[in-house]
Amino acid sequence: MNNYEIIYIIDANVEEGARKELIEKVNGIITNNNGEVVKVEEWGKRRLAYAIDYKTEGYYVYVAFNAEADLPKELSRNLGNNESVIRSQIVKLIEKKHSVKPRPVRAAAPAEEAEAEVVEETAAEASVETVEAAPAEA
């Protein structure tokens, strides 16, 4: 079974009862074809980015589901035949596989070790100078 997401836009002029029936119909198509509805979110009425058939608002619905490979085609066909659905888009979710091995921790290079020793020696010399200078002032 594959993971899919669908977002479809229902005409904003459709009444609430008919809209609920349409959402249930889409979920029924998924479950009747051996699919599993994971999540349904109704995003509500929103302004469209551009006018579609002279309509500027639509009711957005998001559905996440698991199904076989042939279900998205059937679902797309059903949504395309419904006049209340303005637009729909079905996307297959692909799980990202991490085939790259993590980089090994690199040991300090000899040049870096030499620089660290020089810094330690100069810090030790500075502390010796301050100790010698203190009795001279007293």
Image (cartoon, rainbow, N blue to C red):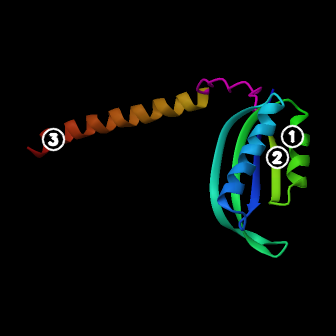
Mark nearer the N terminus (2 vs 1): 1
Q: The residue tagged with tag 1: helix, strand or loop?
A: helix
Mark in the foreground, 3 or 1: 1
Instruction: Judge whether residue 34 is colored magenta.
Output: no
Q: CA distance from mark 3 to mark 1?
A: 85 Å
- On-image quarter of the N terminus: top right
Point out the stretch of residues depicted in magenta: 94-109
Q: The residue tagged with tag 3: helix, strand or loop?
A: helix
Residue ID at (66%, 43%): 40
- On-image quarter of the C terminus: top left
Q: Is residue 41 left or right of residue 129?
A: right
Q: Which mark is residue 90?
A: 2
Q: Answer whether residue 124 is visible to the viewer in this image.
A: yes
Asked if 31 appears above or below 15 in the picture, the reply is above
Mark nearer the N terminus (2 vs 3): 2
Q: Give the camera-side residue of 22 and 94.
A: 22
> What is the three-letter code of the residue carrying label 2?
Ile
